[in-house]
Image (spheres, rainbow, N blue to C red):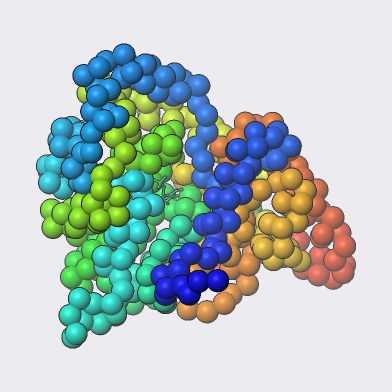
Amino acid sequence: MFPRSRLASRIAHRSGILELMEDLGSALASGSSDVVMMGGGNPARIPDVEAIWARILTGLTEDPVALGPLLGNYDPPAGNPGFRADLAQFLNRSCGWEIGPENIAVTPGGQTAFFYLLNLFGGRGAGEDQPTRKILLPLAPEYIGYADQGLEPDFFVACPGKIKKTRPHRFKYHIDFDQLRITPEIGAICLSRPTNPSGNVVTRGELERLASLASAHGIPLLLDNAYGLPFPGVVYTNAEPFWHPNVIQTLSLSKLGLPGTRTGFVVGPPDVIREIAALNAVVGLANNNLGQFIARSLLQSGELETLCRNFIRPFYQHRCLEALALIDRELDGLPYRVHEPEGAFFLWLWLEDCPLTSRELYLGLKERGVIVVPGNYFFYGMPGESPHQRQCLRLSYTQPPEVLAKGIGILGAWLRTLHAARPRRKRQRSAGSGESDSAD
Ligand SMILES: Cc1ncc(COP(=O)(O)O)c(C=O)c1O
């Protein structure tokens, strides 16, 4: 084999996100109804929303003034100037921000935006006297997709969320501000809101505290709104979009139902936006135009907000409640907890007394035709190993109710068999601890 670079050994290898995307891609490409796909974060097929895409696409193909530049032009690397102006206007109107096109860069999806941002602020410093910097994750578990994006080893420092058992069979992570240390080696703080995998929507108070801490240390807070605000708005609490001069935000069209357009946005100070544009030019010359054309049509017609409010959020909230009811029915009598679902597309299941690790559960469920994501992948940069890191599964609830019923039914039946096979004394102990309401 040919000799390989350090980059190849760092990122071109097996990783959690590769496994997740391979599982997701093969299940969707096979079109088989035998596989229960509760793994990746593919958005659901929502007929009312797909009708809007069809209408816009038909309009674009029938309009030569649009079709020419849509297919035939390389746009500037920061994105289409007219689109960036429309998006800035929308964000100012709907969120009360005060930004212009110079504050927005288009990227090939939020994933690429994070590859750029994490490596702009983490890694070896620009000057001889500059330290190698790390990215601080203030609320772990955190998104599996960042885990392998750092170009330097030991790229992340994660602060485990403080567990609060909120009510029977539910729990919630909180940022443990007492443990959060912003040392000189930290280059940025990074958080997804809603948090993938847990569906936690960090409050305004917590965000203000994080942003002030970042500001006091002269570093940015990177806020990933992939599922959040103002679009696609898959948030079930009364949270609002957040603005602070120290925050660099990302948005994406993917969870509106357009992951195939690979379109994301960075909103931040003009010097960072210029660097994102420079990276776009080096890596890919320009962005895909399709997402910007579709989004511009939604911005100009004023449909974006109604689409999120009337179709997208109610759809996922309904699915979420259906999936929760299925979990509570199929796992009844077993020790389990679900993170309070406040947004995004997932239930984060904590199986504290399960005899198998999350990885073993993932493999066993895959053999049984159910794809989930093992929770261990979301705990990286952690200060140490804890049993909790091997006790969680992420289940997507984007599939139709009958598919969810099948998958959760298979999970429940297998967990029941596993618990029944355990020694009696252990079973009694775990059943007792399952109903405790105290904070960890
Ligand atoms: C939290 C989070 N951030 C970013 C992304 C990247 O999405 P995309 O590149 O499709 O915008 C995802 C995708 O699932 C995600 O869950």
In the displayed structure image, the side of residue 163 where residue 202 appears, left or right: left
**How far across and how far down the image is residue 304, in percent?**
31, 28
Q: Is residue 190 left or right of residue 46?
A: left
Question: Farthest top residue?
Answer: 62
Residue 4 shows up from this direction: yes
Q: Quadrant of the C terminus?
A: bottom right
Residue 151 occupies which quadrant of the picture?
A: bottom left
Q: Residue at x 41, y 34 (%)?
A: 258
Q: Is residue 207 visible?
A: no
Residue 307: image location, x then y, percent: 37, 26
Whether residue 427 is situated above or below residue 414 in the rendered picture: below
Along the line of sight, the residue nearer the viewer: 181 or 219: 219
Q: Residue furthest bottom?
A: 129
- The N terminus: image quadrant: bottom right
The residue furthest front is: 2
- The tally of labels here is 0
Residue 369 in percent (x, y) is at 74, 45
Q: Nearer the viewer, residue 77 or 230?
A: 77
- Residue at x-position 67% and y-position 63%: 359
Q: Residue at x 75, y 56 (%)?
A: 364
| Closer-to-camera residue (106/301) | 106
- Image coordinates of residue 251 in percent, x first then y, are 32, 45
Image: 289 above or below 431: above
Question: Compared with residue 437, is residue 235 higher up or lower down, i.e. above or below?
Answer: above
Q: Residue at 59% of width from left, 60% of height from top?
A: 375
